[in-house]
Image (cartoon, coloured by chain):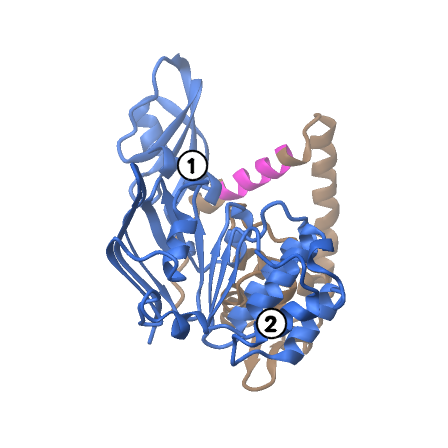
Amino acid sequence: MAAPRLNPSSGTPLYLQLVEHLKHSIATGAIRAGEQLPSVRKMAEDLLINPNTVVRAYRDLESEGIVELRHGSGVFIRESVSARTDLMKKAEPVIRSAVDRLEALDLDEDDIRRLMENELALRRAARPRRKQRA
Amino acid sequence: MRDVVAVTNLSRRFGANAALRDVSLTVSRGCVFGLVGENGAGKSTLIKHLLGLWRAETGAVKVFGLDPVSEPTAVLARIGYLSEQPDLPGWMRVDELLRYMQAFYQRWDTTYAEQLLEQFGLNLGARIKTLSKGQHARLGLIAAEAHRPDLLILDEPSSGLDPIVRRDILEAVIRTITDEGRTVIFSSHLLDEVERVSDHVAMLHKGTLKLCAPLDDIKAKHRRMLLRFERAQAAPPDVPGAIRVDGAGREWTVICDARRMHGAAMARHLGASLVEDCPASLDEIFVAHAMS
């Protein structure tokens, strides 16, 4: 699994960035069902983030049914999770062509990222609130 | 005892200069407590009170429930301290320094020290004055860490150091924290690093505590909004409840409390359009509070 590049000063909280990275790794098959994730300690030390951030990310994934915390052994990807490799394979060219077109308009990486984040934020704001997790 | 550090109404003057003004804060056991502020804000002065180097003029300072001035040995035995310029004797060799430090700390772990020496690539026989700035800092880190202190205090440890040494310092912070019950106070103006590892952040500005809260709360609370007006504004728009309004002409940036302000409504009320509405970075939050 590739180490995520976490940006502490971006708008997204670190734990969410980690959750997204792990979900992406699972979806692309970089981590497989049944595999064990690094311990909280190892993950925190490798990424140089507070262990609580890792705990929060793992808990989020657990409540979404993606991982299970096996007492005494560690954190494992649930067997029931299947790689959404096909879906991700379909999505990649969509993103690639969009970025190609934006680059043709002479926009740089920061512009493109900002546009994407703004667009997603607007959609998020327009969506009805998700029910609160216990 | 849950609070490793308890500072109550601490004030300190140096001549005409008020270095600390009525500062109160607590540091809970097991947390990484980030202390931020510009040069001269009072961070080091606060830390020196924790180390018993300054006696509280007004107010009280307790570390591990003890007064560091009247019980220095009990307090300092459990503290590891690394500052911007670790004052290590240039004439000593690396191994001599570590043997010297060991004498002060009952809990000195030689194996751990050796492990760190190897990891950092420090030569036991090297004279300290021949060490590079980065190696000097790493040695200071070993001296601070090898006795596995209950409280690790890092006062601007990364100043002027290359990214690899800064990594080593952050690793030490994480390592300390994952060890049950140990606490870190990390004072730095490198906000990126503070944001990575801190649970709780306190911000000092000209001796005053401007903010002190869990980092997640601080980030959830502050938003940055970019307003664009049809016509250039001669003066900053009046945005009630904003912490800071900055800009010129047609574009103005507002840093505000997200829970009290609805961006789009505020923009409409001012006759502007809301171009951007996103969480503020720690840097922006810091500047906003410093200037407010």
Residue located 64% across and 48% down the image? B161
Q: What colour denotes chain A?
A: brown
| Marks 1 & 2, CB-CB < 8 Å contact | no
**Residue A117 located within the stretch drawn in magenta:** yes
Q: State the image quarter where residue B246 is shown.
A: top left
**Residue B85 located within the stretch drawn in magenta:** no
Q: Is residue B273 above or below residue B142?
A: above
Q: Are marks 1 and 2 on the same chain?
A: yes
Check the picture and name the quadrant holding the N terminus of chain B: bottom left
Residue located beneath label 1 in the image: B287
Q: Report the front residue among B22 and A87.
A: B22
Check the picture and name the quadrant holding the C terminus of chain B: top left
Q: What colour denotes chain B?
A: blue
Q: Is residue A16 above or below residue A134?
A: above
Residue located beneath label 2 in the image: B100
| Image x and y of residue B190, in percent | 54, 46
Region of the chain picked out in magenta, as a range = A111-121
Q: Chain of mark 1?
A: B
Q: State the image quarter where residue A39 is shown.
A: bottom right
* Res. B103 visible in picture: yes
| Image x and y of residue A123, in percent | 49, 43
Q: Report the front residue among B232 and B246.
A: B246
* Numbered-mark total: 2
| Image x and y of residue A32, in percent | 71, 72
| Image x and y of residue B225, in percent | 42, 34
Q: Report the front residue among B186 and A116.
A: B186
